[in-house]
Amino acid sequence: MGQAPAATGDRRVVIRDAAAELFAAKGVAATTVREIADAVGILSGSLYHHFTSKQAIVEEILTDYFDDLQKSYTEVLAQQATPADRLRNLVRASLATVHRHPYAAEIYQGDYGYLQSLPHFDYLKGVASLVQRAWLDVINDGVATGDFRHDVDPRVFYRLMRDAVWLSVRWYRPRGAYPVARFADDAADIFLHGFSARPS
Amino acid sequence: MGQAPAATGDRRVVIRDAAAELFAAKGVAATTVREIADAVGILSGSLYHHFTSKQAIVEEILTDYFDDLQKSYTEVLAQQATPADRLRNLVRASLATVHRHPYAAEIYQGDYGYLQSLPHFDYLKGVASLVQRAWLDVINDGVATGDFRHDVDPRVFYRLMRDAVWLSVRWYRPRGAYPVARFADDAADIFLHGFSARPS
DNA sequence: GTCTATACATCGATAGAC
DNA sequence: GTCTATCGATGTATAGAC
């Protein structure tokens, strides 16, 4: 009856999601527009009714992810807590966001080179440096307060932790028996113990 | 005089190394044979005097790396020590090998999808599972002896540590002031403390 | 061992019928 | 909104002269 306009945006989302899965699995450059079209059951030419180019699809996938990431971090950064708790919250927020956009996260990590050719790459860089700033600030704070060790370069610790956390999207997928929140706490726990200045 | 045959194999190595650097930076699929030829100052057609195909170049790069990796691990696995020391030795051997073949290591991590199309992919898989087996055995031993924690899944600990260690090739390069051996010890230290069952 | 020239496949993208 | 048909660019690889 007073029915909705037959979900016109649906096709767009279906295409975007199918493309994201392919991009994540094979890389953007190695994925053809024909493969994307096959995945949704249309011909490659029809894709261009929904998107102006292959790049535009990539851009929409990544922008969606980074919008969400920026929002999550803004919330976490508004809170006050000890360095250890703040670091744990960053891990939780990162992993929760990543698993709302697992394909986008994989694309960002695996195709950084290609991404530099995107029109909105500056926006992505801005969010990425916001993320890096947040981690490094917390780690440096913890070293300053004496909570964290000072015998290992904070940048080394940051990068080890960053890779371990963000790359987990390649092998970890949330399950009922081991949900994201618990996984995030395990990861944070290992790194916090490893970088703690105090005997546990 | 009784001179060597004017180093015929040199060109091959020069081409292979130039290709490796490009593959690591942009991905295999996104790197063209013309770019490789440009990098060594010849035309793309001339490449095929040295290699039968682009895939063959990739394969030689990766096989070289994996041969070295297998050799390093065989040595380390012959030694006996505590779980903590053995894990530390695995980190040292891994990072030392990675930094003898930094481009190959980056290619393996960044283009795993493409690699599956290689003729010798089964060999690569074999070495990769040797590596995984070595890490998991040591970790499980440490949990069994009570040296390592039992409240975090060993597989989770393994994967976090694996990603942090192997992905470091993307950002860490050995320097005089911070050589591989020291970096390896720092990384092992953080993870060993983080996964230790004993107060430090 | 490199170059010239080119074959052949595949890619992203477009135009217009339905 | 999809299909048919196709263009132009680009990619890997080959053949033969030098």
Image (cartoon, coloured by chain):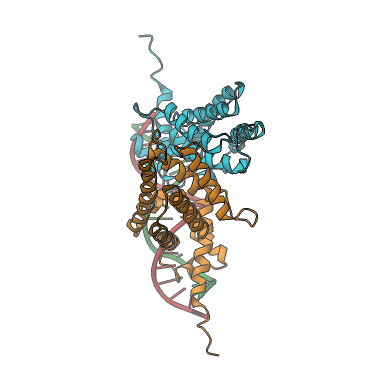
Chain colours: A cyan, B orange, C green, D red
Q: Residue furthest bottom?
A: B1
Residue A82 picture quarter: top right
Q: Nearer the viewer, residue B43 or A129?
A: A129
Q: Is B196 on the left or on the right of A39, as rendered?
A: right
Q: Residue furthest top?
A: A2
Is A89 rendered above or below residue A29?
A: above
Can residue B102 be seen by looking at this rendering?
yes
Q: Quadrant of the N terminus of chain A?
A: top left
- Please provide percent x and percent y for residue B122: 32, 56
- Please provide percent x and percent y for residue B116: 36, 52
Which residue corresponds to the image point at 49% horizontal and 77% vertical from the top-left?
Answer: B8
Residue B53 picture quarter: bottom left
Can residue B29 be seen by looking at this rendering?
no
- Please provide percent x and percent y for residue A200: 52, 32
- Please provide percent x and percent y for residue B130: 36, 54
Is B43 rendered above or below residue A44?
A: below
Is A106 rendered above or below residue B76?
A: above
Which residue corresponds to the image point at 49% horizontal and 38% vertical from the top-left?
Answer: B194
Q: Residue furthest right?
A: A144
Which residue corresponds to the image point at 42% horizontal and 41% vertical from the top-left?
Answer: B147
Label count reads: 0
